[in-house]
Image (spheres, helix red, strand yellow):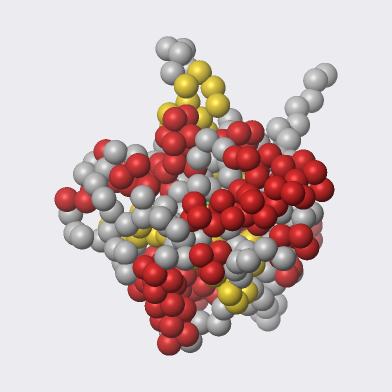
Amino acid sequence: MATYNLPRGTRDILPPESTMVRLIESRARDIFTLYGYKEIITPVFEQTELFTRSIGENTDIVQKEMYTFRDRKGRLLALRPEGTAPVIRAYIEHSLFNGSPTTRLFYLGPMFRYEKPQTGRQREFFQIGAECIGSSSPFSDTEIILLALDLLKAFGLEDFCLQVNSVGCKRCRPEYSKRMKDALKPEEKNLCSACRQRLQRSPLRVLDCKIDRERIRSLPPISEYLCEECRSHFRELTRILKSSGVTFQLNPYLVRGLDYYTRTAFEIVSELLGSQNALAAGGRYDLLVQELGGPDMPATGFALGMERVLHSLKKKKLRSEGEKREDCFIASLGSKARERAFLLLGELRGRGISGIMDYGDKSLKSQMRQANKYGVLYSLIIGEDELKRGIVILRDMKSSQQEEISLQSIIDELYKKIRD
Ligand code: HAM
């Protein structure tokens, strides 16, 4: 018999982890509401060109990580590798810029990149992200950073560090790229093969290389090449971050793997994560809306990786909090009692009391063992004798106290105990 396995780089999320995922999502929604962000849901696939144009022809994502395919009519489509481009596509397509001057949107969902799987890096992964479109103020960059930090805190994480940088704009960045190219050219043959390619196509990405780190750190940082506007924007950002009580590190070598960024770039990294250490990342992208055919609208945003959050949360308190226990277990003895118990379970659920039972012919002892395992608050016991007398035995699982209650009033009684 053939057996089937997960596609490489994907995973099943089983209980209780799936409960944790929902809890994280629900906490995220609460925080987004506090900040005035509204949810946007876009398709999982888009025209490939949307990503090529926005993320950049020469990036790793576009060069080798996209899941592209043709549909039956020959259209070239791609599973989304990230959420920003689709959000901006929708923003333009539905003329959301005609509403309030600043549009604040958030999204949750799967993204797809054909990367080499390892801890914290998958081919299907889940992002929670937000985009703030319409403001060029460093206050909006700070808003996005505070939002990302508040989300991570709401998930129960503490051990992370915010790193910020400015990657300049289309006026000042070319000069820096040229400077880098000139400085590294004489040593080109000593660079790793990936960096040799990057040097030709997008020299700034060389800064991101872990292999050539030492050599790169001897180059002047981009901050020395920023134009006056970018410099003052970055100065303001760091000032507002400080006055908001945010601690951060300046990382002059921080660049992003997507081409659309201008000025602010940031990452929130965690030591707990090993080599894939970015929990969240984002920045400003003032040219993207126009680049994709919309009006001249500055924007900033971020996304965090659910798998990396879950990984850092392992063994932390959110796990037990996340597991919601059923309110009761019904143990029954005999086929008639089982049927009555089944109907009672339906009635209980109708009143919002969650419950569970076993449909086999198990002994009372074995059923009580199950009730203990589920960790329910109460067990109801119905045998043939109880059925004849029109009663059930209600057992408080914590105190082991038992009482007889009439079948007619059990729902109200249990409701009072659990919900009042
Ligand atoms: P990104 O840095 O490519 O940015 O991804 C953001 C986060 O998604 C990463 O920090 C990481 O936590 C998670 N992530 C990325 N790739 C993987 C993977 N293969 N497996 C697991 N987790 C992963 C963006 O996607 C931008 N759209 C963020 C943004 C929004 N910038 C402005 N607005």
Of 254 and 95, nearer the camera is: 254
Where's residue 297, x and y in %?
28, 53
Instruction: Please say whether residue 416 is visible from this viewpoint.
Output: no
Residue 360, by quadrant, is: top right
> Is residue 338 depicted above or below 398 in this figure?
above
Image-based side of 369 in relation to 105, left or right: right
Where's residue 398, x and y in %?
67, 78
Image-based side of 255 in relation to 290, left or right: right
Q: Residue at x 22, y 51 (%)?
A: 97
Q: Residue at x 57, y 78 (%)?
A: 248
Q: Residue at x 50, y 40 (%)?
A: 56
Identify the image quadrant of the N terminus.
Answer: top right
Of 167 and 158, nearer the camera is: 167
Residue 209, by quadrant, is: bottom right
Identify the image quadrant of the C terminus.
Answer: bottom left
> Is residue 68 depicted above or below 233 in this figure?
above
Q: Residue at x 33, y 47 (%)?
A: 289
Q: In the displayed image of the protein, which residue is found farthest to the left?
A: 98
Residue 268, by quadrant, is: bottom right
Where's residue 13, x and y in %?
65, 48
Where's residue 307, x and y in %?
64, 55
Of 196 and 398, nearer the camera is: 196
Instruction: Please say whether residue 100 is visible from this viewpoint.
Output: yes
Q: How many marks?
A: 0
